[in-house]
Amino acid sequence: MSSDKAQAAQAAKIAAKKAALRERMRAIRSECAKTVAVTEETFAPLPGFCEAVKERTIGDGGWCGTYLSVGDEFQTAVLNRLLRRDYPNLCVPCWDAGKGVYVWGALTEPLAEGPHGIPQPAVIEPIPPAAIDLAFVPGLAFDRLGNRLGHGGGVYDRLLAELDHALVVGLCYNRQLRDKVPATVDDVPVDMVITERRATAVRRESTSYWKARVLRRPLGARP
């Protein structure tokens, strides 16, 4: 088999694994959303995150990327309220119809309905990725290496590709953590994952630093 054919076969195999896993994880996330409460206690490590990130920030920072949860996504209403204490400047993914792409836009009122019923600011104020030093992202599944399974559109992979300087934190229910998530070179991993039970440094190259700085007072597992 030629190199091109082998790569195509491997890509098809990974795509099939992702599709099968997405189906299972959507069902699991839906179950969790009905039974698991996301409270202030869930985000107990947050002050440590913000302190450590600001210590590490070089140049113009001060923005935090987050998202406005919908449906059975891991809820961010409490998180976004708490973030305002340390990061008054929040930004979220926004569909820029003029450019035909998603961009980071300042989280301002009023909100309007974007694609797929996802709320976003009615007026988009683009935020340069270099100004973002902390970002929270949703996912259908995460693994111990920080690999993230999204819905397959590649929206967050494109947004996160420009945030290699930032601390990227995945949010999901504990049952969404997997031993292994199929991934390709185009999939952008996260540095940490927060669930309703714990905060965990997952990405190998960042684990030592963030365990020492962010998880000084780790949120222990709860039954």
Image (cartoon, rainbow, N blue to C red):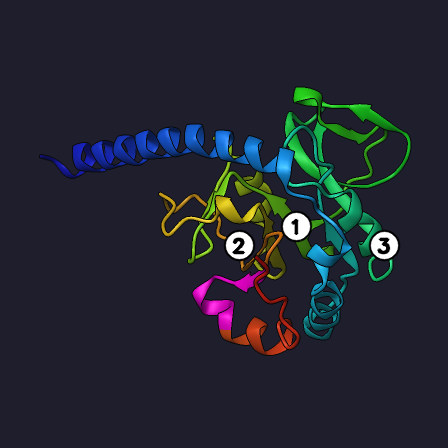
200 inside magenta stretch: yes
Q: Position of residue 91 (x, y in %)?
A: 77, 45
Q: What amino acid is labelled 1 in the image? A: Phe
Q: Residue 17's image quarter?
A: top left
Q: What amino acid is labelled 2 in the image? A: Val
**Residue plotted at (63% across, 66% down):** 219
Give the mark nearest the N terminus, 3 or 2: 3
**Residue plotted at (47% across, 62% down):** 203
Give the mark nearest the N terminus, 1 or 3: 3
Which residue is outermost to the front?
Answer: 223
Q: Name the quadrant of the N terminus.
A: top left
> Is disc 1 placed on a helix, strand or loop?
strand
Alpha carbon separation for disc pair 3 and 2? 22 Å
Image: 144 above or below 49: above
**Counting other residues with Cα less than 10 Å from the Cα at mark 3, is it few (<14), some (14-19), or many (20 or more)?**
few
Give the mark nearest the N terminus, 1 or 2: 1
- The one nearer the camera, 23 or 60, is 23
What residue is disc 1 on? 136
**Counting other residues with Cα less than 10 Å from the Cα at mark 2, is it few (<14), some (14-19), or many (20 or more)?**
many
Q: Is residue 94 left or right of residue 87?
A: left
Alpha carbon separation for disc pair 1 and 3? 14 Å
> Is disc 2 placed on a helix, strand or loop?
loop
Alpha carbon separation for disc pair 1 and 2? 9 Å
What residue is disc 2 on? 190
What residue is disc 3 on? 84
**Residue plotted at (62% across, 71% down):** 218
Q: Mark 1–mark 3 contact, CB under 8 Å?
A: no
Q: What amino acid is labelled 3 in the image? A: Arg
Residue range (magenta) = 198-207
> Is disc 3 placed on a helix, strand or loop?
loop
